[in-house]
Amino acid sequence: FTTEAGLYTASDQVVVLTPDNVDSVLVNSTAALVVEFYASWCGHCIAFSHVWKSLASDIKEWKPAVDLAAIDCANQDNGPICSRFGVRGYPTLKFFHAYSKPDSKGEGFRGFPRNVRDLRRKIIDKMETHAEPWPPACPPLETASRAELDNFFETNSVGHLALLFETSNSYVGRELTLDLLQYENIAVRRVLSTEDGLVAKLNVTDFPSCYLYYPSGIFTRLHVQLEARTFYSYALQRLPGVVRAGKPLPVTSDLAKNTTEDQLRPFNRSRVYMADLESTLHYSLRMELAAHPVIKGEALSALQRYISVLAKYFPGRPVVNNLLKSVDTWLKGEKDTELSYSSLRDALDNTAEVPNAALPEGVRWVGCQGSKPHFRRYPCGMWTLFHVLTVQAEEAADKDPQEVLQVMRSYIHSFFGCQACATHFENMAQESMSHVGTLSSAVLWLWSHHNHVNNRLAGALSEDPHFPKIQWPSPELCPSCHGVKNGEHTWNQEELLTFLRSHFSSEHHLSDYLE
Ligand code: FAD
């Protein structure tokens, strides 16, 4: 009896261990690892897998220093590995130091907590007491003294030093240090409230609070909406000159103007542009679908439903809406079981019979511009289009709460050119799309799953350094969407809904750069 499907997939931030990779992952790694040994049939493990996945996305920035892994001991192929590490009960957690030897069995986490915050703290405790050799990517986690800080810039060439003042039982400073470890040009140190000299010098009265210290000797307080880890992280990651390691420094807009390739159209980052939505339609209908000379079966049904949803909800200019409606009517009248792309193309372009109906040719990316031609553009437009459609369907009080999401799912599955993206999206859809029971939860489903994708792609090669993948919207864009409960970041769903309805609403679309 073999259980093939484990509890984790490639879209989680968890390394899935197998007989083929176990040694290369655990032995001599430059990062420490925490491994969950589980059995996929065990109810506790199924419940715990949600915590492990949330923890993995919560501490994904820590990967170069400490990473999470999991292995399904119910999979027959993995059995010998679980025996080798002496695992008898599930779930078991083991900590493997960086540079572990092949015979290391890892250190057990006895009676480990079952929530993200306490597990994260437990991992920090382990990292702090990590034996030599220390994982090279892990910054110092101990508290900083005044003497160290006085000479800091003599030995460190960063532009910003963030000092997190806190009490000795607080973990925020160490969490923040690890959150920023992949970012260049910034260092974070924790300073205890008992470090009287510094506390007095900066006149620090709040613990925690964060101050920026510059080579010129100037200190300034970091202003955040709430004094909590996530707010500090959002703010520090976006300081000028701070960039994810390995990424080129974003050029300033003045510099960008000097080169044709990098020239960006001026635009407002906090708005949705109709030019992006029309460009997405052009690319989808005239480029992506053209790769399918004959459309039939499941794909034909996906296409019909896509056009029908566009005809119903696309909040476009009258000419575009007229065109979508005429294509929809034509498609509904087609009784053949196969459709040639060329006939669809004729219906899109040959609008002589339908007055005032046309879809502009070509793309003009505005909010979806990338700093290089291979960044952003169409996939950005696709997300934006479907966020707009879920919001439009809610506004129209449509009867079927799943309609737009299911249309997106089938379009992505049948046509989206990035096949790995389509597979990941389908996995997410299978897991939870059918639970969506109201139009507002459809809006929130797409928001939260888009954030899931952002989380997975943060720091990936496809990330435009000018547009880092964040858990969106940022506190600057929607202050009331963010909150803190028991020291942990929370999203305020009511406020989010209000924000999403307004951000994606047709009333707020900008029509600059339209032909
Ligand atoms: P995008 O993620 O494209 O977002 C576009 C805009 O939407 C942002 O600028 C922001 O204004 C807004 N936004 C951001 N987050 C949210 C949110 N949570 N809710 C509402 N609005 C938001 N690329 C891969 O490399 N691997 C994948 O597996 C992958 N899967 C994808 C699956 C789908 C269905 C789609 C449409 C795209 C996928 N992509 C994938 C592409 C990737 O998600 C980005 O679209 C692409 O990298 C461009 O990123 P971007 O910076 O323009 O922001």
Image (tube, helix red, strand yellow):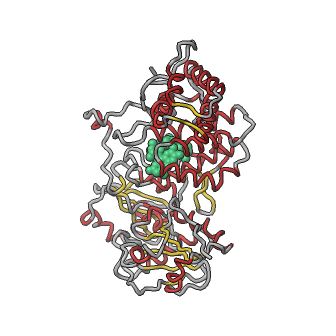
In percent of width and height, residue 208 lies at 51, 63
The reply, left or right, for residue 438 in relation to residue 95 is: right
Mark yes or no: residue 478 visible.
no
In percent of width and height, residue 14 lies at 50, 66
Residue 150 location, quadrant: bottom left
Of residues 324 and 43, the one nearer the viewer is 324
The reply, left or right, for residue 401 in relation to residue 273 is: right
The reply, left or right, for residue 469 in relation to residue 53 is: left
In percent of width and height, residue 461 lies at 37, 52
The reply, left or right, for residue 235 in relation to residue 246 is: right
Please give the count of numbered marks on the rendered protein: 0
In percent of width and height, residue 352 lies at 53, 13
Residue at 59%, 85% in the rendered image? 88
Residue at 57%, 75% in the rendered image? 75
Residue at 29%, 35% in the rendered image? 261
Q: In this view, does 162 lie above or below 328?
A: below
Please identify the residue farthest to the right as the structure is shown.
399
Residue at 60%, 29% in the rendered image? 314
Mark yes or no: residue 235 visible.
yes
